[in-house]
């Protein structure tokens, strides 16, 4: 983990060179560094997760510790799954609704690389979401909780 921390700090310093005089990275600066294309929603969600104090800018500490589960090969599966769960939970309700799942399914299947391999209609994506909720033994009007998510 020490090596990952050092790598993330180096990345932070490189990003901060674009923002002279600043000690925090704004959403606009983060977005320019990490994505403005199809992945903009994912990048925004990651930014919101690591912006622990919710001020619309991340500190070095937010950046390093927020991204550590993604880059640390020694991070536990639970830590990685927790980060993924938080990405899917768009409204921070501690649960993933069918609508949130569908947003992600539409986002991922709209990528050119995915469309070249698989084409799913909206009705088929609805079926995938319904099956996921059935697999978790949850009513579609409910949410997938953290416990249910790790069981899936």
Image: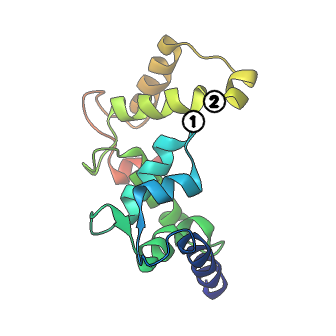
Q: Is residue 150 visible?
A: no
- Where is residue 144? Give x, y as percent: 34, 42
Secondary structure state at the residue bearing disc 1:
loop
Q: Secondary structure at mark 2?
A: loop
Picture quadrant where residue 10 is located: bottom right
* Image quarter (top left, top right, bottom left or bottom right) of the N terminus: bottom right
Residue on which disc 2 sits? 111
Nearer to us: label 2 or label 1: 1
Q: Determine if residue 99 is in view.
A: yes
Q: Is residue 14 left or right of residue 28?
A: right
Q: Earlier in the sequence, mark 2 or mark 1?
A: 1
Q: Is residue 110 above or below residue 25?
A: above
Residue in view at x 58 percent, y 78 percent: 13
Residue 17 position within the rendered picture, expressed as x and y whole percent measured from the top left: 57, 74
Which residue is painted at 57% across and 48% down in the image? Answer: 35
Query: Is disc 2 in contact with disc 1, using a CB cutoff of under 8 Å?
Result: yes
In the rendered view, tell whether residue 53 sits above or below residue 137: below
Rounded to the nearest whole Å, what is the CA distance between mark 2 and mark 1? 7 Å
Q: Residue at x 43, y 80 (%)?
A: 61
Residue 38: give its label: 1
How many labels sit on residues? 2
Residue 109 placement: quadrant: top right
Q: Position of residue 76 (x, y in %)?
A: 55, 70
Looking at the image, which is closer to me, 33 or 114?
33
Residue at the (50%, 26%) spot, across then down: 106
100 sits to left or right of 5? left
Question: Does 67 appear above or below 145?
Answer: below
Q: Residues within 10 Å of mark 2 (few under 14, many from 20)?
A: few
Q: Nearer the viewer, residue 105 or 140?
A: 105
- The image shows residue 112 at horizontal and vertical percentages of 69, 27
């Amino acid at each position: 983990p020490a090596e990952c921390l050092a790598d993330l700090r180096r990345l932070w310093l490189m990003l901060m060179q674009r923002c002279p005089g600043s000690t925090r990275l704004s959403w606009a600066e983060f977005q320019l560094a990490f994505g403005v294309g199809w992945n903009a929603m994912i990048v925004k969600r990651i930014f919101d997760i690591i912006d622990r104090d919710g001020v619309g800018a991340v500190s070095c500490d937010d950046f390093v510790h927020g991204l550590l589960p993604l880059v640390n090969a020694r991070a536990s599966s639970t830590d990685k799954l927790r980060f993924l769960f938080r990405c899917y939970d768009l409204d921070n309700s501690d649960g993933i609704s069918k609508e949130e799942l569908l947003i992600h399914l539409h986002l991922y299947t709209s990528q050119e690389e995915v469309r070249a391999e698989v084409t799913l209609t909206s009705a088929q994506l609805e079926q995938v979401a319904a099956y996921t909720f059935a697999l978790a033994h949850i009513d579609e009007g409910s949410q997938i909780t953290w416990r249910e998510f790790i069981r899936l």
